[in-house]
Image (cartoon, helix red, strand yellow):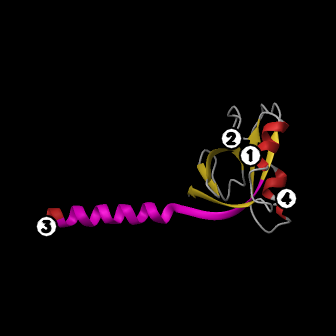
Amino acid sequence: MTKLFLIFFLLLLELESAAEIKNINFRITCYWGSHVNCKTGAALKNGVSAASDHKIIPYGRLVEIKFGTITRNFTIHDTGSAVKARTASRGKYPVLDLYFSNKSKAMKFLSTLPRNQIVKATFRK
């Protein structure tokens, strides 16, 4: 009986973990510079930090974006009024704004994205 309960419990945990994973299309944008005052107070890291609407992806969450054969991970440390308002996608898609230390790094990354810059992001809710 104990074995059966343990198997049921492990199966339930697996189902809960799978239910927490979200896949959403985002409009990708980039920002750069010496932004020391982000919303969470964390130090922004080049090619690692990102901004999103915290109601969609909570602060501190790891986000994985995939496009073609490329996979990149970012952590949500920031937000902004244009991100929340979905300005870059004209309200159609949530915006994921990726931080880079300078414009050339941001533009290099953006050049690897699909032309419409809409990519699927995976994260745990």
Residue 88 image label: 4
Q: Nearer the viewer, mark 3 or mark 4?
A: 4
For the magenta stretch, what is the residue range?
Answer: 4-28
Res 120 quadrant in image: bottom right
Q: Residue furthest bottom?
A: 92
Check the picture and name the quadrant holding the N terminus: bottom left
**Crowding at label 3, few (<14), some or many (≥20) Cα neighbours within 10 Å?**
few
- Which SS class for mark 3? loop
Q: Secondary structure at mark 4?
A: helix
The CA span between labels 3 and 2 is 48 Å
Looking at marks 3 and 1 on the same chain, the residue that comes earlier in the sequence is marked by 3
Along the line of sight, the residue nearer the viewer: 9 or 89: 89
Farthest residue toward the front? 69
Rounded to the nearest whole Å, what is the CA distance between mark 4 and mark 2? 18 Å
Residue at 68% x, 41% y is: 49
Question: Measuring 86% from the left and 65% from the top, which residue is drawn there?
Answer: 90
Earlier-in-chain disc, 3 versus 4: 3
Label pair 2/1, CB-CB below 8 angstroms = yes
- Disc 1 target residue: 98
73 in the magenta segment? no
Q: Which residue is mark 3?
A: 1
Q: Amino acid at mark 4?
A: Ala
Percent coordinates x, y for residue 95 in the rendering: 76, 57
Mark 3 vs 4: CB contact within 8 A: no
Local secondary structure at mark 1: strand
Q: Main secondary structure of the magenta part?
A: helix
Horizontal and vertical percent for residue 121? 63, 58
